[in-house]
Image (spheres, rainbow, N blue to C red):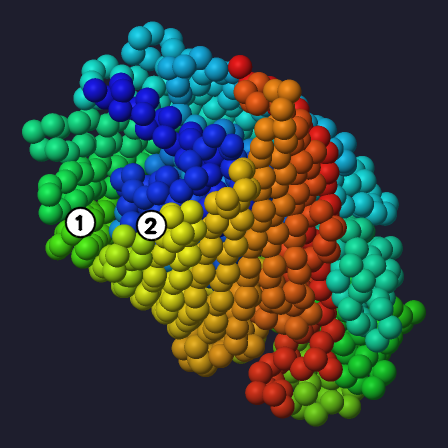
Amino acid sequence: MRFNTILRCTASVAVVGAVAFGFAGAAAAQDGPTTIDDIIVTAQKREQNLQDVPIVVTTLSQEALNGAGVRDIKDLQILTPGMTVTSTQSEASTTARIRGVGTVGDNPGLESSVGVVIDGVYRSRNGVGFGDLGELSRIEVLKGPQGTLFGKNTSAGVINIISEAPSFTPGFNAEATYGNFNAWGVAGSVTGPITDQIAGRLYVAKRERDGFYDVVTGAGPRAEKDDQNQNFWTARGQLLILPSDEVSIRLIADYSKRDEYCCVSTQIRTGPTYGAVTAVGGQQTPPAPGFGALPFSRTAYANRSTAQTMEDMGFSAEANIDIPSWNATLTSVSSWRNWEGINAMDLDYTTADLLYRVDDGGYGFELNNLTQEFRLAGSTDKLDWLVGVFATRENISRDDSYWYGAGYTPFLSLLISSQLNAGTGGAIPQSGAIIGCLTRPGTTAQFLAGCLLNGGTSTSGPLAPSGPGFGVGHGVQDHYSQRSESLALFTNNTWHVTDKFDVTLGLRYTQDKKRLLAVQDNLGTNGAACGGVLGNVTNLTNAFIGAGLSPAAAAASAGGVAGNICLPWANPLFDNRRISEETDDGELSGTIKAAYRLNDSVMAYGSYARGYKSFGYNLDRVQGATATNPLPITPNASLLFPSETVDSYELGLKNTLFDRTVLLNLTYFHQTFEDFQLNTFLGTAFVVESIPELKSQGFDADFVWFTPVEGLSLTTGLTYTDTKYGDFTAADLTNPSNFRQLSLLPGARASFAPEWSATGSVAFDRSIGAGLKVGFNLSAKYSTEYNTGSDLLPYKMQDAFTLVNGRITLGSDDDRWALDIWAQNLTDEEYKQVAINAPLQGSAFQNTVQPNGTFFNPALDTQTYNAFMGQPRTYGATLRVKY
């Protein structure tokens, strides 16, 4: 009977969850299973023992997640070797990477290489996984391409999240938490029968916390003295309907709301532009001697707000219909989701009033998505078969804005005059008043020379500058609207050739269609300064020749001045620019696997998979040089970037040893990505470039031991990755002018790809008499050094580090109550999440090739670098009750 089957499955999952803690830590219940055979996964869309699946899977139960303090996918990385999760300028910009491969999440035009699936519903952006995921049955992390069964855009892996289903057994859970940074949270759920055929579950949570950063606000108007706080609530309601023995229906509705401040960054190296920042009344971390690296700090500088609000809501319906005559099940999964985020930003990360965004809806994006999937799966003695169809329609609406502060014009004047001062041997003084010299209409070389030599001011009337600067206030408002439609047909079939030998073939054909409509618009007089300097480039060149520069150096200096004034947010070529693009493309992907059981304890397998990640549009202002205009100010004719593909090979050995109490799995992998979609922040804009080749190869090793000591389990996981870009030149890029700032990539190790990544944990849970039990969990992850910047600049390196989470539990034997004392980042490890080039504050790459063959010369690096830091040590207590 369907009812009994579901109850058995629910009970099985709950029991397995007590020990199926994957490869990185859990609390094993005293009365739970003690063999590897009880670890169940659904990596192939059917329940299977982990050791029967020819895929690298980390499966993590709710107990495992609780033991390691996991609330969202960013916390999840401590349990998964070879996985990193980071966020940057907002928590919506969350990026997951597996085996060193992922997609930077700051641009909603890009879908992630690591897919997030929650209760069978594909989520196209990783940011939806940041927040309280609620009551979970388990999380499965699948490494490598998984596009055949889990949909498009899973070329690097999948995070498959399965929530706790409603139960026909009445139950109630509640918890209350308090910790440092004034953190507090409450959560509760109730489940039970509504009728004989309907069960429900309702989960509600509210959490708040002060920010991790201390913020210096200067003259304001920002009032908040901290940042990266937490303030959200979430609700999730479910119904399980069993109209007959052959039919089950699960309905899920959820809503989350965040109202927080995020995200500032802090200087990790302050460059020579520090003087210009202070000259316009700003503050930032003072430079170290010789402009070297700064000590770790969580003190940030921001005079403008970083308020962010996010709303996430959706509904899904899953129906399973048994067809006994076919020994098959028809599954339908339907979903509707809406996600919206609005941000304010201090774009210069100082207290100088330069550039910012306000939280009036002018900066943010909204994602609306409909999906429908049908699967028909069945089995015979020799064949497990599955066929399906998947369709989705997604609408993205992105707004972008820039606001000029009162300090922008004098700050830019100081930067330009400082460069000219150095280039002319001090002939042109440093001044905050030269913009008008450069932008004055109808000027002459003589006027320019005199105006610059006098720092933009003179008692002589004819030399008084009168050109436009940058008006204070709202200067840019862009809008992007993208519609995506996708239809896929897929099949996945396992042929049991013999009792020991299986062959699996999976195929998927995906047809994608995307349309982009956009308006890029300058407001008011924004763009006049750029237009003025473009009209003066020839005269400016002659003025520099008159100041003693060679013709070549003078032309380069004039071009550099024009480029600094004509940054994307100030370029009149974007004014009222209308964009309309449409593309469709199809791709065949799939997998073939062969698995052979050497004996009851050992299985060997090999696999090949072809993965696919859809093309898209860069929803940003992007400009560069062209053959007819060497100045890097021409808007890109198209915002399209091509699809990304991957060919992946794996060889694995799954071992179940010592009376099935020890798991030892070893896997070698080799992945080659073509047209890898790299999103890079250049200090002025996000640029998407297709890197011709990225190779990731190495091995995964996983170990689980249910020890003879009652309630004690040990686990480790180890991943070695050699993830490197292939050699390429400017001619191999979609936009060759991007090569200068990507010139460190050819042949180099990719960002966020540590060579070694290891996890380990010890978990203990045991009765101590008097109706009580105690438990503890210690989970740790070690990563070797890796670069945190897409452009691989040396200052963005993160040294090797180790994170440790710990938890001690005292509770009743019947689980009616428990008290947890916990700590995250127990050793208070100091580390960078992501390092960036501070906007407008120096330059790391030069205009000509340097002696090392790239455009980077450390001796000429004037860039100020900022970083979004990892969370500090947090600790507290959680009281849980259950009835």
Q: Position of residue 577 (x, y in %)?
A: 47, 54
Classify residue 335 by image quadrant.
Answer: top left
For the point 47% across and 24% down, which residue is it? 236
In screen coordinates, is 268 left or right of 881? right
Residue nearest the observer in this picture, 445 or 560: 560
For the point 15% across and 38% down, which residue is it? 378
For the point 54% across and 20% down, which residue is it? 814
Q: Which residue is mark 2?
A: 51
Q: Position of residue 211 (x, y in %)?
A: 74, 40
Inspect the image, locate mark 1, and give the three-letter code of the amino acid beneath it: Asn
Is any atom of residue 227 visible in this view?
no
Residue nearest the observer in this picture, 779 or 483: 779
Inspect the image, locate mark 2, and give the three-letter code of the amino acid beneath it: Gln
Residue nearest the observer in this picture, 24 or 762: 762
Q: Check whether the beta carbons of the residues at disc 1 and disc 2 lie within 8 A of each other.
A: no
Callout 1: helix, strand or loop? strand
Is any atom of residue 13 visible in this view?
yes
Comparing labels 1 and 2, the label whose residue is closer to the camera: 2
Q: How many marks?
A: 2
Crowd tier of the residue under label 1, counting other residues whose Cα lies within 10 Å: few below 14, some 14–19, many 20 or above: many
Q: Which residue is mark 1?
A: 493
Residue nearest the observer in this picture, 852 or 396: 852
